[in-house]
Amino acid sequence: MLILAIVILSPFYYAVLAGDQIRSNVFLVGSGSQTSTISSQVDLPVTLYVGNDLTGVTNPIKRSFFRVSGVYSGGGSVQFKINSNGATAKTFTLPSVSNPEDFDFIYNDDSSLISPSSAGSYSYTLNVIPSGVTISGFAAKLETTYQFAPSSCVDGAPANEKVKTTEFYIAQLNSLSSATLPVSLYIGDNITGVTNPVKSAYFLISGVYTGSGNLTANLNSTGAKTFSLTSVSNPTSFNFIYKDDSGQINPSTAGVYSYNLNVSQTGLTVSNLNVKAILTYRYKPVSCGVSYPPYGDLVSAIYDSTANADGAAYNSIMWKGKLGGVSLDKGQVLFQMAAADSTGGPWNYVGGTTCGSGDWYNAASGTPVQLNCYTELNNKRYFRYKIRVCADDCILSGNSTPIVDDVVVNYSP
């Protein structure tokens, strides 16, 4: 019997404030396809957004670094600087190779040049200086963790705009020929009136391959990028960043936004494909005392249970976390399940004792609930779940909501 554990983020949450808080955000600095090369210095603009109150916080930046990756050929080095400042320079040696090789470095801001002291936008330049090497598929992310002083409201005064990073698991496939992966991004915060709320949006695509060929990705059939993979006979891992350069992800209000991520390969055998989306956006917090909506829904990524046409038997589903409110007894967490023979569905979500589209599985945290809808679910290769987080009884609004940390689906191959 297999147990699959899936970590998700709930669309709404309740938190108790006590002293200063810590927040981490991720911003994509730049990315290129495998056919775009860097052999001389490039200067990449970097914008850091801080939406929280840093006033009075001593040394608010706790961690700030760039994660840089790509594929190189030749032999030499690559140097990084911030704002062409020599004190920030770090050089990474890349040994001579006969075939293109991956690299993945962490370039830390040891000089503390990135040091905001108040909420706002901060602009920098990341200097990438290769020597003796040609880089393709380059990608850089800025990851920053800072300490801030919360207000008396859960998320701060409504006049202040905040920034948050949310990860969404899109799919896990045991094999890939070509696939159209449904993408659902959920924004539960108020972004109305926020200029260009999305600050960073990209997909992490990783897996294992053999052979020689290309991996291609596009969003809604636009903005295609091709990543070339060197010929290998032994299983070799890959990790690419696909950026939404075409601006398809451009929400203007809270809600659910749906897209299709198309991923295909030529000349390769791909296994253990994993895809997730990372979205960083600016929003306006609610006013103090404003209640949450009756519920918020979230649909999971697509999961491949068996890697063959004979699907699994789905046994139970369980969530881990806590209910809302000071006494941790407010709200409900409900589930529906769907299974299909292909990643394209159809996805018919069912639940409860009736196995109908309007019925839901309901259980306390840490208590498995049996998935009794055998006809609708069993012997199908792919599955998804829908989670409903309710502020009160799923009909009335409330002042707090549950927190869901993990979802565990138990199935037998």
Image: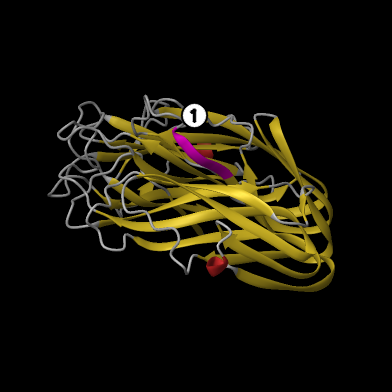
Residue at position x 28%, y 43% in the image: 13
Return the residue nearer the eye: 64 or 42: 42
> Main structural element of the magenta stretch: helix, strand or loop?
strand
Which secondary structure lies at badge 1?
A: strand
Residue at position x 57%, y 43% in the image: 202
Question: What residue occupies the far left of the structure in this picture?
Answer: 327
Residue 33: give x, y in percent of width and height.
73, 46
Q: Is residue 172 visible?
A: no
In the picture of the structure, the residue carrying the numbered disc 1 is 257
Q: Is residue 261 visible?
A: yes
| Quadrant containing the C terminus in the rendered view | bottom right
Magenta stretch encompasses residue 374: no
The residue carrying pointer 1 sits among few (fewer than 14), some (14 to 19) or many (20 or more) residues within 10 Å by Cα, namely some
Residue 160: give x, y in percent of width and height.
28, 37
Q: On screen, 97 above or below 399? A: below
Q: On screen, 71 above or below 285? A: below
